[in-house]
Image (spheres, coloured by chain):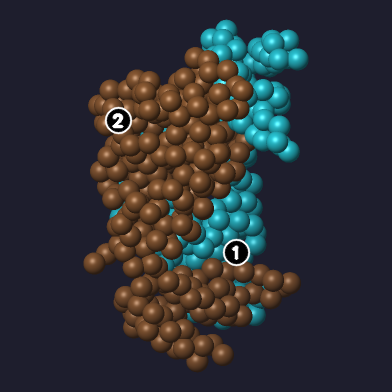
Chain colours: A cyan, B brown
Amino acid sequence: MPNPTAAMLVIGDEILSGRTRDSNTHHLACALTAAGIDLAEARVVRDDASAIANAVQALSAAHTYVFTSGGIGPTHDDITADAVARAFGAAIDIRDDARAILAAHYVRAGIEMNAARLRMARIPEGATLIENPVSAAPGFIIRNVHVMAGVPKIFEAMVASVLPTLTGGAPLISRSMDVYRGEGDIAGPLGDLAARYPQLSFGSYPFQRGGVYGANVVARGQDEGALDAAMADLTERFA
Amino acid sequence: MPNPTAAMLVIGDEILSGRTRDSNTHHLACALTAAGIDLAEARVVRDDASAIANAVQALSAAHTYVFTSGGIGPTHDDITADAVARAFGAAIDIRDDARAILAAHYVRAGIEMNAARLRMARIPEGATLIENPVSAAPGFIIRNVHVMAGVPKIFEAMVASVLPTLTGGAPLISRSMDVYRGEGDIAGPLGDLAARYPQLSFGSYPFQRGGVYGANVVARGQDEGALDAAMADLTERFA
C-alpha cells in the first residue's frame, strides 16, 4: 500500500520578498519522511486571503494531510485562520476554549489581553486546537489541514504534538554513496539500477570538493533488502 | 502600475524528502525584489512529469515570469526539459546548438560525450538557451518559463544572466525597526499605520533575544517618502 501523501503551505510575504528564509518546510520534510508520510508538494503564498484559500482547497483535496505555517499571530497581516475558514465555508469567531488558554497565559506572564491578542482566539467552527507550548496561542486542525505558527520554534513544537495523531506508512529509508565520477558517467549505470529495482527510487546529486567532481547517489525505498542489494551493486560498479 | 509578478518552481524528490535544503527560492526572491519583480508564489514538486507539467501550466498562465530549478542533469530522474515541453505541447529533441556547447566543453575538459551527457542537449523547439558558465549544460527559456539548474552555484549564475533580459518595475524598498514590545502590543498601532499608508505593506516578525521579547517591524513599498514618514510615525509611537 502506498504511503499517505502530504502537502506543506507556507504563508507569508516575508518569505517571498527574501526577508526571511523558510526553514519549516525542511523540518516538516524530515519529520514526515521518518513517519512514513510522503511530502508530495510544497507551496509558498502571500498574505492574501484568496491565495491562501485557493491553495488550501487544492492541497486539501489532493493529499491525506496538509500543514500550514505562518499568519496566525495578532497583527493585521495575520489572516490565515480566516482564510482557511473561508476555504471550507466554516464560520469563524473567538472561541471560548482558545480565549481561556490565552487568558491564563497572559495572567501568568503579566501581559495585558487586548483586542489584537484576542484575534489569536479566532478558530473556525469544528476545528481541534493544537497546543503551543512556547507562546500559548494555539494552532488548529480543520478537516485534514493543520494550521500552525510560522516562528520555527513554535512550528516545530506543534509538529511534534501533531505527529503522533497521524497515520503513517512504512518509513522511507535511504542509503547513499559518494561516487567520484562525473555525473554523466554515473547516469548510465544508475539508469540500469533504477530499472533493476523498480521498488526503489534513485537520485544523483553532483558535488565539487576541492576541484574533485563527483555525485552523491541516493537510493530510497521501504524494502531494506532491495536497498542493501542495490548499494552492493553500486559499490561493485564504481569501487 | 503594479510590478510584474513571478513564480518559482523547485523540482526534486530530494527537497521533499528532506535530503536537500532548497536555497534557490531565497536567492531568487532577493534578486527579483531588487529588480522590481514581485515573487508571488513558489512551489516544490516531485520528479514526476505530470506534477511538473501541471505546475508549469498553472504558473505560466498566472504570472509574467516563471523560473524553475532542478532536473536538467544527465540522469534518469532528470525529466524537467521533457515535462516542460509537454506542458506547452512543444516537440523536444537533441538540438545542434546545445550539443555543440556540450561537445566543446567536454573536449576542453577531456571528458567523454556519452548518451547520458547528450540528454542535456534535449531542448524544446523554439526555446532560447541560457548560458551555464559552470558546467556548460544550458538552461532554456520557453514562452515565459526559465528552466534552470538545481545546483545553487549554477542556478545563481543562470539567474544573473537572465535578469538583465527581464522587465522589472520599481524596486520594492523596505525599512525595518526592532520594537521591544510584545507583538500583541504592536498590533494595534501597526494596523493604524497600515490604514494610514495604504500604498505600503507592513509586517511584524516576532523574536526573542536573551529572554527579551520584541518584533522586527517591516514596511515595504515603492514610495520612499511614504516609507520614511511611516518609520518616523513608528519611531514616535514606540521610542
What x and y, as percent, mark residue A227? 67, 16
1 vs 2, front mark: 2
Q: Residue furthest right?
A: A239
The answer for which chain carries disc 2 is B
Q: Residues within 10 Å of mark 2 (few under 14, many from 20)?
A: some
Q: Secondary structure at mark 2?
A: helix
Residue visible at 50% across and 27% down? B104
Residue visible at 51% across and 79% down? B186
Q: Quadrant of the N terminus of chain B?
A: bottom left
Residue visible at 46% across and 57% down? B31
Query: Would you say the residues marked 1 and 2 are in contact, meaning their CB atoms lie under 8 Å apart?
Result: no
Residue visible at 34% across and 80% down? B197
Q: Quadrant of the C terminus of chain B?
A: bottom right
Residue B186 shows in this picture: yes
What x and y, as percent, mark residue A142? 43, 48
Q: Residues within 10 Å of mark 1 (few under 14, many from 20)?
A: some
Instruction: Give the left or right position of residue B107, taking residue A232 as reference.
Output: left
Residue on which disc 2 sits: B87
The answer for which chain carries disc 1 is A
Residue type beneath disc 1: Ala
Residue type beneath disc 2: Ala
Pick whichever, A130 or B125, lies toward us.
B125
Looking at the image, residue B95 lies above or below residue B209: above
Query: Would you identify the image quadrant in which residue B131 lies?
Result: top left
Q: CA distance from mark 1 to mark 2?
A: 46 Å
Q: Are marks 1 and 2 on the same chain?
A: no
Residue on which disc 1 sits: A136
What x and y, as percent, mark residue B147? 40, 38
Pick whichever, A59 or B200, lies toward us.
B200
Residue A145 shows in this picture: no
